[in-house]
């Protein structure tokens, strides 16, 4: 588990971020519905830590990660990187800032141009940002990157299809590191890899974080991987964050019913240990027409009538020495059972 300090300066701050996708149809191609992919999300990431973002497929994790980098333009909200609101930046300013903010994609083969050699792939960001003054300097930097990610230098003339999945992901990591970023969005970087290779890539990311002082937003649906690498964890459901806490606190004392259900699904290798599995009823509601009140109430085992009427904010949990918040009316809250409830509409 990552042990980076949670007391450092805030590197990235997301405030009330919203991303909606219009659905158009009819003869006039007008907007007929809206997909609410990310709904009023706020969180901070401190320098040197790893925030793990977990949730079921389709909950908006990747959309959130790409919106933070403005690979997808947010509908509303603010994103502060080192105190600067990047939602206000123009294309040229954002292009320069992207030296400091990079992304590692889920599929390492689709993310690499099959017609380019490793040397060409790693040269491209150096040329775009003017980081290599000469051919010799560029070659030297490429060799440094190959060494950093554990690839042989003589491999620079090979093409992506000549590498295994784990090696291709190492190339993607090297490409992200080429411009010396401070913050990296890791968008499910190990989910397409074999389990044995997953551990190698996760360990590599942790080593690079310590060596280069990197900060990660680590998006995944594998809760054991997230527990291993994350300093803090945010749980996302249907476009909203429903619980946040330091990693060890969340795994030991989950407060939101959805978090409890996710953690109950983690397999235990010891067959002698019996663990109660929480089976959620029904399917995830459509982000086009989410339910009123708490989005989770149609599937929640402890939902009441009140849960259908109000959306609870992220309440601070009582009795925790570290910051722990959950968006549930029945969590062990510091402010009592019925205060501070926000309308969902």
Image (cartoon, helix red, strand yellow):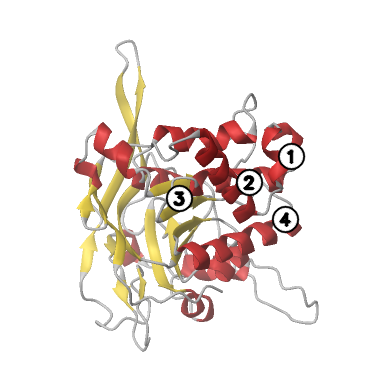
Closer to the camera in the image, 285 or 138 = 138
Q: Which residue is mark 4?
A: 197
Q: Residues within 10 Å of mark 2 (few under 14, many from 20)?
A: many
Q: CA distance from mark 4 to mark 3?
A: 23 Å
For mark 1, give the secondary structure. loop
Q: In the figure, 29 relative to 315: above or below?
A: above
**Residue 232 to residue 20: above or below:** below
| In-image side of 11 versus 158 (left or right) | left
Would you name the residue on which mark 1 appears? 163
Locate residue 83, reporting x and y percent: 21, 58
- Choose the circle earlier in sequence order: 2 or 3: 3
Does any portion of residue 285 appear in the rendered image?
Answer: no
Residue at the spot 40% in from the left edge and 56% down from the top edge? 182
Q: Nearer the viewer, residue 161 or 124?
A: 124
User: Which badge, 1 or 2, is on the more N-terminal residue?
Assistant: 1
Mark 4 vs mark 3, foreground winner is 4
Residue 198, image x and y in percent?
Answer: 68, 57
User: Height in image: 141 above or below 224?
Assistant: above
**Snapshot quadrant of residue 216:** bottom left
C-alpha separation, residue under disc 1 versus residue under disc 2: 10 Å
Residue found 31% across the figure and 68% down from its top: 314
Look at the numbered disc 4 and give the secondary structure of its residue.
Answer: helix
**Image marks 1 and 4: residues in contact by CB distance under 8 Å:** no
Q: Which residue is mark 2?
A: 169
Residue nearest the observer in this picture, 169 or 207 = 207
Q: Nearer the viewer, mark 2 or mark 3?
A: 2
Between the residue at mark 4 and the residue at mark 2, the CA separation in whole angstroms equals 10 Å
* Marks 1 and 3, how far apart at CA: 28 Å
Residue 291 x, y percent position in the rendering = 36, 50
Q: CA distance from mark 1 to mark 4?
A: 13 Å
């Amino acid at each position: 588990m990552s042990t980076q300090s949670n007391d450092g300066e805030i590197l990235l701050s997301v405030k009330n971020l919203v991303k909606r996708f219009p659905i158009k149809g009819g003869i006039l191609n007008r907007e007929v519905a809206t997909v609410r992919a990310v709904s009023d999300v706020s969180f901070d990431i401190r320098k040197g830590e790893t925030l793990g973002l977990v949730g079921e497929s389709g909950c908006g994790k990747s959309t959130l990660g790409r919106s933070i980098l403005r690979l997808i333009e947010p509908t509303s909200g603010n994103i502060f990187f080192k105190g600067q609101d990047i939602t206000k930046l123009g294309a040229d300013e954002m292009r320069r800032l992207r030296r400091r903010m990079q992304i590692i994609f889920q599929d390492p083969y689709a993310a690499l141009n099959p017609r380019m050699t490793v040397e060409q792939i790693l040269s491209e960001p150096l040329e775009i940002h003017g980081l290599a003054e000469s051919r010799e300097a560029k070659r030297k930097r490429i060799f440094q990157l190959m060494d950093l990610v554990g690839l042989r230098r003589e491999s620079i003339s090979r093409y992506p299809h000549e590498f295994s999945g784990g090696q291709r992901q190492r190339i993607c990591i090297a490409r992200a590191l080429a411009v010396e970023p401070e913050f990296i969005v890791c968008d499910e970087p190990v989910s397409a890899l074999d389990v044995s290779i997953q551990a190698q890539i996760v360990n590599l990311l942790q080593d690079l974080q310590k060596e280069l002082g990197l900060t990660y937003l680590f998006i995944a649906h594998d809760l054991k991987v997230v527990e291993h690498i994350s300093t803090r964890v945010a749980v996302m459901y249907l476009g909203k964050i429903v619980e946040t806490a330091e990693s060890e606190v969340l795994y030991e004392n989950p407060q939101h019913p959805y978090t409890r259900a996710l953690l109950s699904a983690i397999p235990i290798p010891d067959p002698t240990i019996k663990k109660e599995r929480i089976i959620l009823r029904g399917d995830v509601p459509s982000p086009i027409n989410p339910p009123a009140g708490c989005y989770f109430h149609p599937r929640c085992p402890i939902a009441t009538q009140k849960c259908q009427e109000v959306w609870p904010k992220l309440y601070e949990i009582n009795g925790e020495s570290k910051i722990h918040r959950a968006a549930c009316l029945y969590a062990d809250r510091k402010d009592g059972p019925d205060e501070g409830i926000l309308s969902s509409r």
